[in-house]
Amino acid sequence: MEAAGRLLCRVSLLLLWLQPGLGRTRVVQAAPPGFIESSCPSRIFWVKLDKRFLQGKFFSLELVDPSGGTVLLDEKLAARCGYVLSVDVWGNPIFRASVLGCHVANKADELFSLTINVKVSSSPDMRQAATYTYPMYCTYSPWAPREIVCEENYMEVSVKSDVPAISDDDTAIWMSALPEVQKVEYQVWQLIFLSPSGRKKIMVSDAANLGYSFNNTLARVFLRAPYSSNESKLAVVNGVNMNSVSSTSMYKQRWLLLLIDTTVSCPIDGTRFTDTAITWTVPSIIPTLVPQEPTFVSKNISVGVDGQRIMHPEQNYILEHNKTHIRMTVPIEAAGGRLKSTVANGVHGVIYSINLFLEHTWTDVDWHMTKYTVIKPITTPFMPRIPTVINNTLPEKRIFDVAFGSFLPDVSLVTITIGNVPLSPGEAEHHGYKVYEITFPNGTKGFNLEVPFDDPTVLKEYVNRNETKYTLRVNYTLHVGPEMKPYNHPAEVECVVADIELPEAVGYCDKENLYLAVPVSALYQYWNLYIGNELLNQQTVLSNRYLLTTNSTHLVLQVPLFTMGIIYEEVSFQRLKTRFDLALRKANTLETIKTFSVSCNFNSSEFIVCYPNGTVTVSAPMKTIPSIDMGKTKLKDSTCKPKDFNEEQAFFQFHVSTCGTLLKFEGDHIIYENEISYEKKILPPWGPPRITRDPDYRLTVLCYYPTKERLMHTAMVSNLPTNGSPPFGYGTMMVRSNVAGHRRTRQVLNIIARVSKDESFMELYEPNLTIVKPSLEPIFFEVELKDEEPNVELHLNNCWMTGSSDFKSTSQWNITVDGCGNENNKSVTEFYPVSASRRVKHPAHFKRLAVRMLIPLLGQVHLHCTVAVCSPPKVSSGNIWTCGGRCDPTRKRIDQHSEPYSGLHGYVLAGPVWIVDPEPTEEKNI
């Protein structure tokens, strides 16, 4: 039974209908006080059973027939006999019965009585059930000529059985039934249905088999019909679906022919829902019930809830009435209804239920007066109500204060999981947490939780500069609604507190070192110290010649003046301004939080600084007896003179690609070497013998740049430090011996690279000219070794082009690799042979090549090359070793992991060459 199904679901009661032959043991007794309540609103027996008494028990209903005996209530009997078994919005079982019901005793159509048996048992077999007999009495008078009741499971119409007066307008309608009437048997009621399939006549005795109930009292005839029978039809009236049964009841005696219209029509929907209200609509005029609409007059409209008439509905509801419809708007949560919590598909929400009824009285010319009653239980669809987590935490209290809600009173907190440990509210209190209910102003409730920041279950994460993010993860388990459905809701709340004190470093200097003292409190918990991109650890300290000491409060880093990591902000003849930076970085993200710096000025007559971009500055002291003129000192390229000098020192500044600087590779370092020497005064200035009084002055300048590992030359170029950022190279100065046998002029590589005007290499651009070339035309380069030694050969190892003169550039592409031309998607390289000529004395000292751009490229370009100068090949164990990148496809190239190269290495730079759109250009002096 559908009603029974709702009963089981809503109130958690077990309902068992007794079968014939069972339940023979009967204990009849009076009902306990408050268990059964009844009333008689609008000619209906209305009975309510208290669900509290029935909780966990089994019950059934029996109808006591006035003639004796009982009948068990079931679904089929209920619809045919005018009974309804349901539950109210609070879950209490409800039984309703029409006063014209099958087992109701009727006295003069004014006094009605009905007795029911409520059988209650603690076991499902109902054999030991207690039976509570409950008699009911209702009075109802006067009756309207026609009364219609639209119940949940049946429609009922009752009319006066007096012979009505037939108006002239209705004569044709009534006379059309005469052929059927003539066939009616004497003193037997028969029914004629006008259904969509046509006219259908049945005997009253057969109507019961179709689910109908037809009967008469002393003064009335009534028909009760189920919804959606075969003889019913659906129609839409003013937007509301109606179910109608059109029928005529016929009775014939010798002196009487009685035709009674027993048509009935009831709404089957008419409800609309929003998040805030229910709208229930019933048509004002129903055409099947009011054939002559112009004569229709509405007399009274009243509404009620749970059978109780509402005297002033406007106080809680909105009631509208016009010519087309009667509309009642019920706000969600209005009095008389119930808002209930539930769970659907794991989502928390609510449903609102209310049992309404409408009574409409009207008059028309046919029926004089009709009383139309509709009973309408309404339940909204599921409305999600996602609970919210409100973080009321005050950081200064260092306690999470979290509110969770809001909920109706029918929700209870079962467990709360903190740190993967489920705890009941009582257990949570024993763990040092506070869990309690809070009431909100609208009558709903929530659950409040307090957890200290320092609790082990709270996650802690260092964020931003000096803040800690505390995270509390909670999982609430609730019992929802009367059915106590389980519901889980995970929640996560965060609070960021500025409770970390950033360390402050102290810097100072002495004559040869820079110092930084950093507090060690919480240092390695949140941060690490970095020098450039290198973590400050023992390996970094040892490899860079630092000194690191630590005590209980601070670490002190001592950094020598001339070592890796020193930033030289100003290097001049007068002073040396240096800075050392120590970065404080996050341990997990390496984000730099702050930089500790110490900056000092030094006065030093002897120093060398090697910059990341290849610039070298040297302050060379005068250390000879007798003294020399420091203004006459020079580098390997005699054109490179000091920028400034005095009696005690000379100040040089040059790039590693100039002034005859030599490139060498040793271990994990690139080494650039040059030499400061003194131009002696020779007497006589021509031919031997030679006499000089000047002392010998030779100072070797070395700059070391670290590489990560032994790499090929192109890789070494890529690993040269970036311009302007540490690590710097470090340099040393070494006084040369004045013994001639140890002076090797072969150590000086004087190499130049220039741009030729065309492929003949007869005319070369001078260094002071701007070189402009149209796009996509070849650029001709010549590299020359300025050396008089005939038995050496110049080799190009690796050449590349960039848009910058820096040794390393972020955008570069190879021109040659290991002495061979390299084709790529930007350029093609072609070598040109070199023959002896007026300008070329030793062809082996020259390399010529052309670079043709394959894509349009505008702007300046530079040519960079690493070179090698080799002696004649040596023979060792039958293998020929080469000193440079000689391009020979028939022989495998010997790399740096084989026998070391024989020869000297260097580096040259040519350019810039300005590449422009193809158009006439002019050469001009800079």
Image (spheres, rainbow, N blue to C red):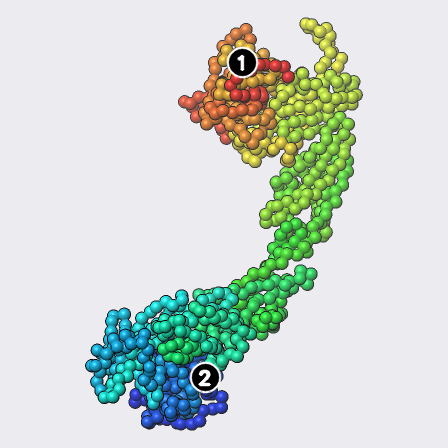
As helix, strand or loop, the secondary structure at mark 1 comes to: loop
Instruction: Say which quadrant the C terminus sits in.
Output: top right
Against 362, residue 667 (above or below) is: above
Q: Residue furthest front?
A: 168
Residue at 26% of width from left, 77% of height from top? 175
Q: In which quarter of the image is residue 472?
A: bottom right
Residue 918 in percent (x, y) is at: 51, 19
Circle 2 — which element?
A: helix
Local packing at callout 2 (Cα closer than 10 Å; few below 14, some 14-19, many 20+) is some
Amino acid, disc 1: Lys
Give residue 592's position: percent from left, percent from top: 64, 44
User: Is residue 316 shown above or below 72?
Assistant: above
| Residue positioned 70% across, 43% down in the render | 596
Q: Which of marks 2 and 1 is nearer the N terminus?
A: 2
The residue labelled by disc 1 is 757
Q: Residues within 10 Å of mark 1 (few under 14, many from 20)?
A: some
Per the model, the C-alpha gap separating discs 2 and 1 is 117 Å
Q: Name the residue under label 2.
A: 41
